[in-house]
Amino acid sequence: MRAMWEFFFGVGWLATLTSYLTITTAILVAGSLVMMLLTWIERRGLGYMQDRKGPNRVGPFGLFQPIAEAIKTITKEDITPTDADRWVHFLAPVVILASTVAAFAVIPWGNLIPVDINVGVLYIVAVSAVHTVGILMAGWASNNKFALLGGMRGVAQAISYEIPQVLSLVSIVMLVGSMSVVDVIQNQMDPYGNILSWHIFTPVGLLSFIVFWIASLAEGERPPFDNPEAESELVAGYMTEYGGMKFAVLFLANYLTNFAICAVTAGVFLGGGNGPGSDIPILGTLLSVFYFLAKSLGLFFVMVWIRGVVPRLRIDELMHFAWKFLLPLALVNIFSTSLWIAIIRWGAEQGMGIAEALGAPGSIARIAVAWVVTAIINVVAFFLVARLNATRGVTTYQATPTAV
Amino acid sequence: MLSNYAFIGIFAIAAITFPLLPLILSRFIRPRRPTPIKLSTYECGLEAMGDIWVQFKVQYYLYALAFVVFDIETIYLYPWAVAYGQLGLFALIEMAIFLLILVAGLVYAWRKGALEWI
């Protein structure tokens, strides 16, 4: 109570508020700049993959192209179709972008940490899941068959892939023993800058990474999972009736989601801002921001790469992949993570007296045994689940004529 | 701790303002010359035919139900995952049973064809 009183009426509240507002503005500006860079990377990268140059006229290497497009969209006429539900049509982009941006409150930029809350991982997942509501709003309010279909598909896809995504993070939370994003990154810190301390370099972390990355691609509606806005079948899905600034807001949300996915993946599996020299007092902060951005942008390039080479999935394959492949794998991975921790860390106290024969907790022999056991479980599970999903011959999708 | 959530609150307000700002700003910049044809539904470029209230597959709702089941079970897994390192063998066996119940639910839904997109 006293803390609350001091917080609201003490001397320091104005200073605190100012610092919070400064940090917030800095994150929003940096996020927008990174988003502009991402659109440039995507268009140039795809261009070179398709043996053309991509935008290269505006500014050096076409770097100012996103600014030109921002000016274009802000001066474009805004069209709200007469049949559309005006308010929902207007609010849908706001909901989608706001939910995406809110996740950035806890994502650390290297050593620069906006805020460290003890449920950080859950907060990111929970807040970014709200964009599903926005997709349905956009699809419904447009009053258009294809937009509604895109919205329905978007919701079905988002909720299906959310489960493997969240379950794969459970493994990491178990390894760390905390849900704070800062603790997750600290857990991968090695005083010698050894990259082998990253979560991805353990059998459980690797399977978790694979499941999380694929599920996140689907959550962010990246190709090959872009069925909600499949331009060759649904025109532009739930974005069809959006133009001008509203479309720009949806576009911004799309790329900010992609950046959030890359940033979270880099932080959770690739050690965030950790790297050689990232613990030096001031220079280390700059280095850590550099490492963080390098890892995130590298992951984004992988996204562009996937878009360049993989064709879009059919909607039934898409749903089966989430429920019949990723979900069982995520569940198996939780089990093998619990074995990993039991073998490496537990002694007689926790009822693992047998493991004492291999040496003290954390010894090389224990780590070796844990590696072998979890790797065997995960690999066997992978092939078993793949076999369960295998179909003989070519399957065809027969849509019933009335329902879509 | 309280001030951490104060930051989250301020950030949430900023996150809502962030999309509203350019939307309102563009109101003063952009032209505004609506015509009935311009404001008609685009759909796919042709004149829109029929009603938008088309019949939807029941699978959407089956997936939604399965989602609710698994999402709630995930929420139960998180506190266990945080505490797991200190719990001991009992927690491992207990959670293995819980996971088996989860898997049994998944197998049931799979065998029943609830996960099929027909």
Image: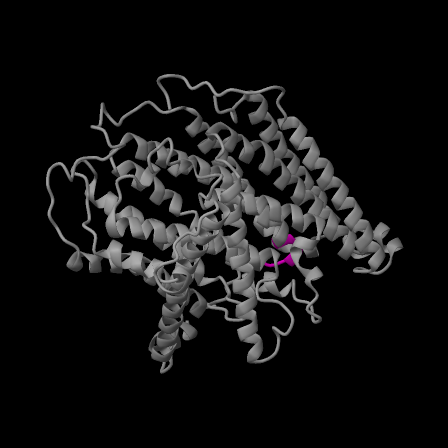
Question: Where in the figure is residue B50, as x and y percent of width and height?
Answer: 22, 23
Residue A270's image quarter?
bottom right
- In the foreground, A227 or A381: A227
- Residue A316 % position (x, y): 49, 28
Scheme of image coloration: one colour
The foreground one among A240 and A212 is A240
Question: In this rendering, is residue A50 above or below B13?
Answer: above
Is residue A400 inside the magenta stretch? no
Which residue is depicted at the point 33% across and 63% down? B14
Q: Is residue A105 visible?
A: yes
Let me know if residue A178 is in the magenta part.
yes
Residue placed most toward the observer, A47 or B84: A47
- Name the quadrant containing residue A72: bottom left
Which residue is found at the position 61% from the left and 45% from the top? Answer: A210
Q: Quadrant of the C terminus of chain A?
A: top left
Where is A299 relative to B72, above or below?
below
Give the residues in magenta: A173-179
